[in-house]
Amino acid sequence: MPFVPETDGEFPTLGWGLLEWFSEYLRSPRDPSVPVQFTTEQAQLLLDWYAVDPVSGEFVYRRGISRRSKGWGKSPLEAAKSIAELAGPVRFDGWDSNGRPVGRPWGTSGDPNAWVQIAAVSEDQTENTHSVVYEFLTANDGAAADALKIDAGLTRSYLRDGDRRGKLEPVTTSAGTREGQPVTYAVLDETHLWVPRNGGVRMAKTLRRNVAKMGGRSYETTNSFVPGQRTVAESSHKAALLGHAGIFYDAVEAPTVKPDCTDDELSAAIAIAYGDSWWIDVDRLVAEARDPDMPWDDVCRFSLNWNRSLSSGYIDIKAWEDLSLDVVPPAGERVALGFDGSISGDCTALYGCTAAGFVFEVAAWEHPPDVDKWRVPRGEVHDAVANAFDRWDVGRMFCDPPKWETEVESWAGRYGSGVVLAFDTNQPRRMAPCSRRFLTACEEKSIAHDGRPGLTDHLAACAKKQVHLNQDADDGRTPFVIVKADTRKIDRAVAAVLSYEAAMTMPEPVDVPSGDVVVSFA
């Protein structure tokens, strides 16, 4: 008979049958003398993930992602699911007399035999989940393995139950050798570490293709990711937020707290992120967060489950605000300019900086919030540049050229090719040193600014991204560039950094007329 909900919000799922199956066959990794027990959150995830269509019985989700705090319990849950995908009732097999879905194992009713792969970017990382699989199967002298007719091994396990055969194995990023394998279920473990350079992105695509052709499914487990690193976790996060069909996304984040919050506030936030994971010692996590050697970003990513850049910020915004001065560089002052341009979406900004390191806004253009279609008024930009050269003695101008190449060439032709220079901020070899120089000036208080809130907001939206320059930094410090910490704009910050770099590297004036006033500060 067709599914008929008995309560509001009830949906058909194979999860109820699987919870009973787990209780019958698997023992607790913490205490093998008792059946495995899932928290309410974990049980609900099982019910949601194994939801089926109330008419066709097809699974609602084709792939899933759990982004949870470190230690929440992702690996034990996924290990249990992997064993079920090898030998348990995970395939829809019709409706019972009460209109509830029932399941059958792979390898029955014409289905192919099960092939489960637990994938990671290294052998050590596959152990996160695969070691728990082995624990489940071998506890109590291998009671689960014997009952399920699984030959459990450290490197792989085989199902040998009559005509049914199956395999469960850990795999790593040799994606080329994985193409076309008849995998029925794939675990993509720790996908915040899966990036193009280690083969993770390619392997994710391969595994998804493989399970798709078999009518199987895949599931990712991950901690929060670092935005901008092109990880599989970030790609899946975006796909889920865009509402792509068939993606199940489980993520619980702590509410916003700041580094200087009280211990009680931090404890409450961490408790929300961990839900009902009763084994977590929240007080201990708070103590670790307060350790001076614990970066706040690690607290944000691993305990609070926030997607966070490698630095909580580029500069100390409070310290930056304290560096403001209520002055204006007078006409004729020797200054440098920094320009970061866009077409419509981002901000276009022109900033100046004196030889003494005083940063100020010359002009900025940003999409008005009440206007649908808008483009940067290039004529106004030309006028602002011309006015700046007329008003001050511009010794150097650095311009980020994309989408403004023609204008940059025209300014160089008008004001001098040795004065107006293209500065591609996408080149880490050039951008990393000036990102560091600006930060050092802020830390040493050898820089000041006009206090405009726009620049402060854009600096607050910056994060540091580590880069590799194929050479060691002379001072032993890790090179980095500034990037967006989230979706907020940083164009004013980029222009300001370029203006400061230009000011610190511009040539001395050939002739400084007597009587000029120079803005300086202690």
Image (spheres, rainbow, N blue to C red):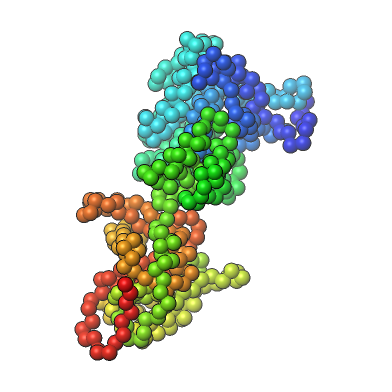
Instruction: Judge by depth and name the residue closer to the eye, 482 or 345.
Output: 482
Q: Position of residue 71 (x, y in %)?
A: 48, 33
Residue drawn at the location 53% of the way across and 24% of the way down: 80
Side (left or right) of 25 relative to 406: right
- 3 displayed left or right of 517: right
How many badges with numbers are in the image? 0
Q: Is residue 486 above or below residue 63?
A: below
Toward which corner of the image does residue 438 lie, by quadrant?
bottom left
Q: Quadrant of the N terminus?
A: top right
Res. 88 in view: no
User: At 55% from the left edge and 46% from the top edge, which residue is drawn?
Assistant: 265
Whether residue 395 sits left or right of residue 169 in the image: it is left
Residue 299 vertical placement versus 343 (above, below): above
Q: Nearer the viewer, residue 11 or 368?
A: 368
Spot occupied by residue 47 in the image (x, y as percentages of width and height) = 64, 30
Q: Is residue 31 above or below residue 238?
A: above
Q: Position of residue 38 (x, y in %)?
A: 59, 26
| Residue name at image x 45 percent, y 55 percent | 485
The residue positioned 48% from the left and 51% from the top of the image is 260
Say which quadrant the C terminus sits in.
bottom left
- Residue 288 in view: yes
Q: Is residue 53 above or below residue 362?
A: above
* Location of residue 480 in the rendering, given as x and y in whole percent from the top left corner: 33, 55
